[in-house]
Image (cartoon, grey):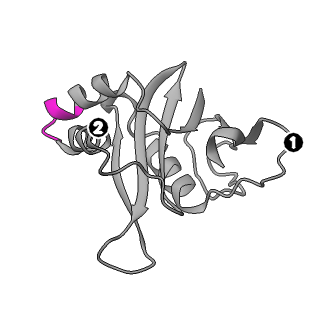
Amino acid sequence: MTIDIRRLRDRLPQEMAGLESEARREGYRHVARLIDEWSAGDIRFEHHGERLLGADVDDALIGIGGMTVDSAMSGALRMRRFYIRPAMRGRGIGRMLARLCSTMRVPAAASSPFMRETMLRRGSGSRSGFNPTDEMDIAICSRCMG
């Protein structure tokens, strides 16, 4: 399975409506709040260190997660608005988004539009610290993540 992680900027993808619908059926309102706050311009994940990421499998949005400046603590960032479709849970996708939110640094001089990190099979470890249950590739578009 290939999971593509992309940074969401400028506008939310149309697939957010389906994600919000699933979240609402489970009793979660935070995806709806994200859509409302984004539409109102209250939160756009555009301050230094902030980002909103989307996870796709076969061009379908399967999860989101973000990081914003924490207004309660100066200089701190807060992870928020994480949601993974129920059918895709238990595969480490939320953990992957959280790790990328907190550690992602894309070199400004990246010559290739993609950085690829191959995740290793369970038990063999990886440089990223993820422990996936299956072999997967993560494609990170450097021009989207920078």
Circle 2 or circle 1, nearest the eye: 2
Callouts 2 and 1 close, C-beta under 8 Å: no
| Residue at x 38% of width, y 21% of height | 14
> Which of the pair 127/66 is nearer the observer?
66
Q: Mark 1: which amino acid?
A: Ser
Q: What residue is shown at x 75% (from left), y 39% (from top)?
A: 116
| Residue depicted at x 33% and y 41% | 83
Which of these two is toward me, 117 or 136?
Answer: 117
Mark carried by residue 30: none
Q: Position of residue 70 (x, y in %)?
A: 36, 70
The answer for how far apart the CA atoms under marks 2 and 1 are is 34 Å
Q: Which residues are magenta?
A: 23-28
Looking at the picture, which amino acid does disc 2 mark?
Ser
x and y, in percent, of residue 72 in the image: 29, 76
Q: Secondary structure at mark 2?
A: helix
Q: Which residue is mark 1?
A: 111
Q: Residue 117 placed where, x, y %?
A: 73, 43
Residue visible at 68% across and 43% down in the picture = 119
Image location of residue 130, percent across then percent down: 59, 53
Judging depth in this view, the residue of 40 and 70 nearest the camera is 40
Secondary structure found at label 1? loop
Label 2 Cα neighbours within 10 Å, binned few <14 / some 14-19 / many ≥20: few
Q: Which residue is mark 2?
A: 39
